[in-house]
Image (spheres, coloured by chain):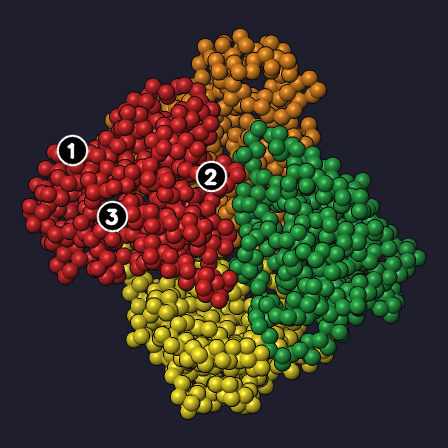
Chain colours: A yellow, B red, C orange, D green
Amino acid sequence: MSISFASDYTKGAHPKILEALIANNLNQMPGYGTDAICDRAKLKIKEACGCPGAEVFFLVGGTQTNQTIIDMLLKPYEGVVAAGTGHIAQHEAGAVEFSGHKVLTITPAGEETDTDRFGSEIGKISAVELDAYIEAFYSDGNHEHMVFPGAVYISHPTEYGTLYTRKELTDISSVCRKHGIPLFLDGARLGYGLMSKRTDVSLKDIAELTDVFYIGGTKVGALFGEAVVFPKGCPVQHPVPVIKQHGALLAKGWLLGLQFDTLFTDGLYFEISRNAIEMAELLREKLKEKGYTFLLDSPTNQQFIMIDNDKLKEIEGQVGYSYWQKGDSTHTVIRLATDWATTKEDIDRLMEYL
Amino acid sequence: MSISFASDYTKGAHPKILEALIANNLNQMPGYGTDAICDRAKLKIKEACGCPGAEVFFLVGGTQTNQTIIDMLLKPYEGVVAAGTGHIAQHEAGAVEFSGHKVLTITPAGEETDTDRFGSEIGKISAVELDAYIEAFYSDGNHEHMVFPGAVYISHPTEYGTLYTRKELTDISSVCRKHGIPLFLDGARLGYGLMSKRTDVSLKDIAELTDVFYIGGTKVGALFGEAVVFPKGCPVQHPVPVIKQHGALLAKGWLLGLQFDTLFTDGLYFEISRNAIEMAELLREKLKEKGYTFLLDSPTNQQFIMIDNDKLKEIEGQVGYSYWQKGDSTHTVIRLATDWATTKEDIDRLMEYL
Amino acid sequence: MSISFASDYTKGAHPKILEALIANNLNQMPGYGTDAICDRAKLKIKEACGCPGAEVFFLVGGTQTNQTIIDMLLKPYEGVVAAGTGHIAQHEAGAVEFSGHKVLTITPAGEETDTDRFGSEIGKISAVELDAYIEAFYSDGNHEHMVFPGAVYISHPTEYGTLYTRKELTDISSVCRKHGIPLFLDGARLGYGLMSKRTDVSLKDIAELTDVFYIGGTKVGALFGEAVVFPKGCPVQHPVPVIKQHGALLAKGWLLGLQFDTLFTDGLYFEISRNAIEMAELLREKLKEKGYTFLLDSPTNQQFIMIDNDKLKEIEGQVGYSYWQKGDSTHTVIRLATDWATTKEDIDRLMEYL
Amino acid sequence: MSISFASDYTKGAHPKILEALIANNLNQMPGYGTDAICDRAKLKIKEACGCPGAEVFFLVGGTQTNQTIIDMLLKPYEGVVAAGTGHIAQHEAGAVEFSGHKVLTITPAGEETDTDRFGSEIGKISAVELDAYIEAFYSDGNHEHMVFPGAVYISHPTEYGTLYTRKELTDISSVCRKHGIPLFLDGARLGYGLMSKRTDVSLKDIAELTDVFYIGGTKVGALFGEAVVFPKGCPVQHPVPVIKQHGALLAKGWLLGLQFDTLFTDGLYFEISRNAIEMAELLREKLKEKGYTFLLDSPTNQQFIMIDNDKLKEIEGQVGYSYWQKGDSTHTVIRLATDWATTKEDIDRLMEYL
């Protein structure tokens, strides 16, 4: 592969993380995240979120984090409400069901979606639909024989790179609080959402409006790691055994703390996220110039374009991309993702192929 | 309640079952279905199904049976494909997910269904849609990150009283066999399907075309009990502990054997099922006479009518019915179900209220 | 088999239950235990227990009941403490583990037990051992990596027919309350415990000292059914979907209500339990006369004797018994159980063989 | 803490791993272990194991690995046989039960163990006991109501640092094969077992005698990672979704491949393991010189000594150790662990405190 825009997790970590790793490599540390580096990283994250009373945990990867958090939020007879396009509904091998819970989808699963939802809405749920769903559930005389909506899952950015506005998030949060249902925001790509030129949502807004969210490291400059934040505290009395039961308690937990400590020092997380956004904007411009059309107008680091099937064959093996879905009879929809380390030169090289 | 058509499980058992119960009450029997009455009942069922090599188990209720069979069929990373209106997808409190498996729905969940599917199709899946779903799954480059389709669930009659034709069943069965996926038919109301005036599907057809099905007792003349038939044998080497783990192994298993032995002696099961169908036909006729319109043209014992909301208030507390869904602004859709014990007098009394 | 003392669930139901069944057979009843008969039965049970504020549920069988209650009591990271000989630890096919929880045994698993525990202690746990176990758990620096003790399971009578004294129950209850851990009493044979000549424990004592228990029907005069009592209310906000998820929600729930209504009318449950005890005392006397020795001095309906292996071969196929464990080189330990319907004539016939 | 011998996972990774990480940091790699580095590492491991037909997977941590493998090996109605002291039985927060399976322990849980087992036997199971357990299970007439032994778990080195001899492993393997039950060897500290001066077991022996084992990285020079080897192939048709369901599929799987590629280049894994052994031998010598007594004669990197309680207080906060268990009235048993990076200077410093 000469150049890849297949995803935002093709590279290692920001050099500062490797430096910190080398510096701490032989310092002996207690296990399972009970070390001072984790403590320091948690403090910095709580400060960045504006919620000193938060509880923060570091987990290793996205599916693991979604599964563990959802299992923490739900009672056994409850399911999690999500968009049909949600990562937990589609691409986590049934990890939520494996833990005993149904994913209750309230929008279609993607390709089938009518085009009206495209643009800035695909991948999102609306407060109105959510409220209607919950109201309908409780007004159904048979609801004791059905799966209770016990938490709401949203991703921001979504799997389509789209973003909630602050107004939308506030409305969803209000619906959740009206019904006493916790709101969980999957921030696997959170940095790219926060640094979008077209967002009015800040990290503090998210901490205020959700009950739990995570700050993705794997896709934003870390080797691996997701920082889970419960702004009002964790609902589980003993989170450690719950995390361990999910196979999610890293022996050398300080590796996670160290990465987030680095990312949340001097705003590195935000700075490198901004790079991905700037490169995505540049990419979009250049693609437009070349006449490519877009599946939707994505404000973040993932761009979805229609590409001629012949062209696609031509670049095969030379340009890394993600197959997304069928387009029309002569085109395919592919995803191109920039990341924290993408350079202008990378874009130039990509455009040579395209 | 003066008269109820709310469901087909409002009454006890056929008098012959009670007689058999009294006759055997103090005969000492070994536990857990290892008795001679169960053996005899199994033989009669295998004969009725035309498959002497079948394995038969007796379980207590429908949700329990669906959960246990599906768990027997699936590998941990597999889900069960079903209609969005399927009982397992809607009204079993997430029992399938509780066992760790996703229900993969390939049609909408009911009310939202566009009216084109109504008539004889609602509640069913089609071989074409099923095949397309499975093909799409395996052609998706990410399918190792998704839930594998590991079994297909259909109900016959469906939750809407509709029936598959032999052609349709054959086609679905062919798709399943092509992909090596077992076909499971939920026959909670099987008698009412087999005795419909408008079916060409026999019990032997079902035994031939499916990999597992059950013959519902709870809704068809028994106090409780479902007879699970694996026409080609059970895929699980030790079914007893699996059944017990699901809380489904009755200590006095002979109670189940005794009921099915009675129902499968001299064709009682079919005879009493026919009564429900005849009463449903009579009911439909009378309702049509009175000008009621139907949600769909159901060929079995469940009839779905549009009823004026004022009328509904009027009969409240006097006529038992099942609320089904909203109709138009002035009407509601309700379900009226006949059963093995419904009499002409019951219909007459109902019509007085309607 | 000419006569069987193999277990206390070899027969059907007390005739009064069959009469009630016949009388109610065609009365139409709402489903899932929402009927008036269930309500009436619950009232009678609450009165018998002396706790009007209790919540009562009717489930179908023992393993199902143990599994469902334990799952209701435990958080995901908790296990249930039990005797190694406990039914949940040995003979329920891992139903508790199937629901995700460990059984934490604090005594050996039976046969290996040193003989000092025999006599009246086998099958029981002690308050002292329980307290030591819980104290040791919390004083272990690694306990966040271990399974938390989240509930305590005892059976009364135990699997060996032994009984707790009121003092012992009170002490266990105190330990549980000290640690904030609910106490669950498996009463599959509760009647036989309450009617023992050698007990000072009443039903009201049990209601006062435990957090949940059940009154066994299957082994004490009912066709099937266990009445679960939460004296201080159920800890789960929505028990119906939890019960349904466990496959334990009977469609014709009134069948359970009707049986317990009958058993708790005019003290029938206690009266028929007393019969089993009287017959067990008679049996013990006669066995002693014949020179049989006992594994332990059981005060309830299960008697465990050493029998010569040659004798055992002789009665094979004529007398039903339960193999219990190996005895010495020439003897085997077998269990003989009387029940609610055992007669003097049954005992006489048995003794002819023995 | 001035110096810590608390465990073998207190430090980062061998410098060569960090070098490899830096060298590959910005090379774009496909996700989820589908990269060329993983392929290369797998080849090297298969070669070292002498089994070119093996299947190898890289997982992140020990509990996760144990849980995932055991879930792969077992049918739903099966449990895993283990020593009562086994890590899965004691210190994994019930992760095996969380996946629905019972841990069937055939030896006591440790402290209670009578002293006869100490020395080289503690932590191990014997082929004779294992065979007796399985034979007893199948000869129990009630075994269909019990948890089937479906796999055998051993650790090598054990949690007490002890080792199986080749003869013992061969015998256990024979018992497993006789009964058709797979043998799983937890090698979280495998290097320290293989490099012990007192072992006759090679990596190839393990590959020959077991059905699955893992080569621990976390405790032997890697940042994290366990290499799972199925010498005769994996019994699960689609391991990827199974691994993902357990939250164990690392997005940047190449990080695992890279570490094992480094460890299995030029015998690095063995070389650094030998260091820990040599340091442990030195430590043992020096401790003996000082008159310390040992809980057992451990042939690997974990040493368990009796230490005076006053001495323990004195070194508190200065020397890192693991509390193990109570000793006599004036002593405590502590664990001291050497690792791949322990130096003679570390030992000297430790001895100054002791």
Which label is found at residue B343? Answer: 1
Residue A300 to residue A74: above or below? below
Residue placed most toward the observer, C278 or B289: B289
- In the rendered structure, which amino acid carries the disc numbered 3? Thr
Q: Secondary structure at mark 1?
A: loop
Residue D272 to residue C201: above or below? below
Residue B184 is situated, as x and y percent measured from the top left of the image, at: 38, 45
* N-term-proximal mark, 2 vs 3: 3
Residue D185 is situated, as x and y percent measured from the top left of the image, at: 70, 51
> Seen in the image, is D168 located left or right of residue D86?
right
Label 2, label 3: how far apart the Cα atoms are: 28 Å
Residue placed most toward the observer, B296 or A88: B296
The residue at which mark 3 appears reads as B162
Task: For mark 1, name the chain.
Answer: B
Question: At 49% from the left edge and 38% from the top edge, which residue is drawn?
Answer: B239
Q: Looking at the image, can residue C345 be seen?
A: yes
Decide: few, some or many residues near mark 3? Use Cα within 10 Å; few <14, some 14-19, many ≥20: many
Residue A46 to residue D209: above or below? below
Image quarter (top left, top right, bottom left or bottom right) of the C terminus of chain C:
top right
- In the rendered structure, which amino acid carries the disc numbered 1? Thr
Q: Quadrant of residue A205?
A: bottom left
The residue at which mark 2 appears reads as B234
Q: Secondary structure at mark 2?
A: loop
Residue A237 is situated, as x and y percent measured from the top left of the image, at: 53, 59
* N-term-proximal mark, 1 vs 2: 2
- In the rendered structure, which amino acid carries the disc numbered 2? Cys
Question: At 46% from the left edge and 46% from the top edge, which residue is drawn?
Answer: B73
* N-term-proximal mark, 3 vs 1: 3
